[in-house]
Structure formats: C-alpha cells, structure tokens
Image: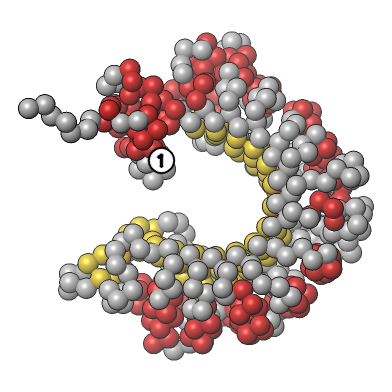
Amino acid sequence: MTDRSPSLLGLAVELISEILSHAKDISSDPPSRAKICILRLVCRQLKLITDADFFSVINLDFTRITSIDDHIRHLADGNTSASTHCKTLRIETRGNLYVTESLVGLLKDKSFTPSLARAIKSLQNVKAVRWEVQSVDLVQPIMEGLTALRQLEDLHLCFNLSSAGGYPEMFPLRQFSRLRRVTIGNVRGGEFLTDLTKQLGEVIVKSPLLEHLEYVWPNNKWPFRPIGQENNIFHTLVQDVSRGRNLPLRRLAFRGCSVGFDERTLPHLRNLSTLSICELASDYANIWKVLSEASIFLKGIAVDVMDQDLIRYLTSYSGLEELSMTCSLRSPLAVTSNLHSAQFYASVLPRHNHSLTCLIVVSALTNWCINPNEMNLVLKCQRLKELSITLDFDKICHGDYERIILTALELPCLRSIKVLTSLSHRTFGYGTGAHRYRVQTLISLESILTSLDIGKYVESSESCALVANQVEYVAQIATDGRMRFLKKRLLGDAIRWR
C-alpha cells in the first residue's frame, strides 16, 4: 500500500517558509540557526526555501574579525544568494582593543575598503538598516554603500563616538531620500549636531511618506529654556517642507532637545498616533495644549513627566492604548510629577481602562509606587497585555506585595509583567549601607515571588513572563507540586535609581 502521509517537501513553499521562520531567531536560540544551515544542505529545494529566511537579516559584525573579511568579499563578488534575500542590514562595530588592532590590519589592505562599499551596494533589496557608530574607521565605505540602497525605507543610526569633532563631512545624511522611518540617536558635539540636524531636515523634505521620526540627544543640561522657533528642533526639521504637503507622521520621539508644536508644525501632526518625549530641554505644557486644541488624540504616549497639563489632556478623551511614565529623581519636574499620582489613578486611568493594552509606571518617586487600591483600579484594564509597576518596600506592608502581584495575574490578557523596587531616599549612593539595603530588598522580593501559589492564575510557563529588578522568572511546577515562579536568569544589573 502506498504511503499517503504528507512529507515536508510536499507542502506548499509558503507553509515550509512559515515553519522555518520560527527557528531563525538568533538572539533567543542560537542553535536554531545552525539547524537551518543543516537544512540548506539537504537538497536544492530546501536551500531555495530556507535562504529567504536565513538571509533576511544580515549582520556585518566587525567584532568577529576572523570571518568578516570573507563575508564581505563573498558579498562584493556576488558569490552568495544573500544579496537577493536580505531585507535588514545590521552593522556592529563594537569591540575591544583586539578588534581595533585587527581593523587596522584590514584597512592596510587597499582592496578591503572598496570591497566593503561594493558588498553593501549589492544588497539592493534592503529596506532597513541598523548601525551603531562607535568608530570612524569604516564610516566612509559604509556610508558610500548605504546611500546606494534605493529601496531603503528605515534608517536607524546611533552615534556612540568619543568625540564628535570633525565628523560632519563623513556622514552625508542628505543623500538619503524616500525614507519612511528615521531614527538618529545620541548625537554629540556642537558643529556635528548642527550639521546633522540641518541634513536631517533635507532628508525629511525628500521623504514625503515619512511616518516615523525619532531624534535623540544625549542627556540635556537643565534648567529648561522657553520654547521658540530658534530652539524648537521639530520646527527646524520641518520648516523647509512645502506648505500644503503635510507629512503622514504617525510616530514622533524626541529626547534631550527643545521641542514644541506651533502653526507651522501642526499640519504634520494630523495623523500622529504615538508621541514619546523625555528629558526635554523645554517646557512640556505647550505640547499638550496644542494637541488638545487641535483635537489630536494619541493612541500611545511615553513621557517622563506627569503634570497638570498632561492630566488635563488625558482626561479630555478616551481610547489611549499605550502609556509609559518613567520618571527619575534627576528630573527638575520630579516633584511636580509626584503630586499627580493620585489624580492619575482616580481620573486618567478610568478614561482609558477599556482600551489600554500597555501600562508602564516606573518611577523612583514614592507616590508613584503602586498600592493594593491602585492595583484594583489597574485590574479594570481588562485588555492589558504588558504591565510595569514599581513597589516601595518602605511604604506598604509585607502582605500587600503578594496581593499586588496576584491581582495583576488576574488580568486575562496579560503576557508580561515587570516589577521594580523603589529604594528608600536614605539609601541613594554607593556606600556599604546603601548596597546592603539593595541586596536585602532584592532577596526579599525574590522570596515573595517564589513563594506565591500561582496555579489559579497561570496555566503554563508561556502564559505570562515576569521580570523583577532585571531577574527573569518562569512559571513552573515546584517541588511541592504547585505552580510557582522560579528564578530563571539574570538579565542585567538590578535597577538603581539615581
């Protein structure tokens, strides 16, 4: 009898591609990429199918000098199908002294720099580029290659240079056009900053379909300055866009600069749905006033200041889906934010509890540390998928910790919860007493989380991810046969408010 059971190769190409796509995430499961490498060697059909997923993201990792030279030359010579399938290009230049010395050796090879430019130019189907610029050694050939990518829509540049002097001519940003998403981060230096801002304005003029704009400066130097056209960075960026040709901006994000909205910028905000503004060097009040008067009601907001103007704006409508409020004690408006926590839970949250899917309230300010009554108000946000809260170990009794966490787990759609602890004001610093208090706090929080019986709320480890002070916990059956949170791994240093 003939075996009629379906085989992998008998499936449609789209189905095979979908199956294999679940195994290509390098960051979460490194061995999975090796398994796809093996599949590519099985037969020509599987190679053709897997190549589209395998090469959809290419990482030019200059921290792995032993192999980067060969990769570059294969791309430059057209000896790989990667150039056809690549949609996202990531460029990694971070490294140690060994990498720097190895790069010097590569640069001595006169054929390497042209090969690098040709390799990037060969990726003509690339739509997104992510580049963290930490060295100027390879800037010119990389920029030569990137500016030749005609299908590029998403450009993400993050500058982490020790000094920004003398670099403007190395970054011909103005050569880019027709972009939909632009992120420029951590730009330092007066001349470099001025030149890059001017060039970014030229890019915006040549990108009529721009939907996403993010501009991040290093931490600003307070106090605030009155906002005007001469120091309004958003006004500067869009001032040369022809009147009547409004940008379809849907997301704006600014950090560290002066930002305000006025009659010239307002037409470009009509489609805005998400706004992120943090550590601004200007007053926030103008922003919420203009949006309210223009009846522009956002779906997503990320701020580091909760003032009366924002409270008034948020209570003027309903339908907010994502809200993030992260405030550091370094902010000059920290005291102002601290005064409005009760008003936020009593007035703002009820206006949006039917629509919120993400709520992040992370603050060193004690008034913003959640208590059981406020957690009951959060419980009314039945569509929440992501929740981040702060606990104050000095303000609430021990039993309240458990109630807050268990109440959060009652949210039916919750997929991620992050818990941070706000340390006592007397423990700020780096002394022995402060360190001892932090350690005791982390131990207490771990003891509370691992002792919770969560079987009633969590069905499996996939139901909800929990991170507390950068420690990841997973729901598993404990030795006593009950479902509990067990510590899985440390994601990084525990949060320390300054």
- Is 320 placed left or right of 294 in the picture? left
Disc 1 target residue: 25
Q: Can I make out residue 483 in this image?
A: yes
Point out residue 378 in the picture as x, y percentages from the top left corner: 52, 78
Quadrant of the image for the C terminus?
bottom right
Placement of 400 over or under 27, stated as above or below = below
Point out residue 327 in the picture as x, y percentages from the top left corner: 64, 69
- Is 173 placed left or right of 450 in the picture? right
- At x 54% / y 65%, what residue is drawn? 358
Looking at the image, which is closer to me, 305 or 190? 305
Point out residue 450 in the picture as x, y percentages from the top left corner: 31, 72
- At x 51% / y 21%, what residue is drawn? 84
- At x 62% / y 19%, what residue is drawn? 121
Placement of 407 over or under 254, stated as above or below = below
Residue type, label 1: Asp
Looking at the image, which is closer to me, 32 or 313? 313
Placement of 336 over or under 127, stated as above or below = below
- Is 391 placed left or right of 484 in the picture? right
Mark 1: which secondary structure?
Answer: loop
Looking at the image, what colour scheme do you see? secondary structure
Point out residue 265 in the picture as x, y percentages from the top left corner: 86, 53
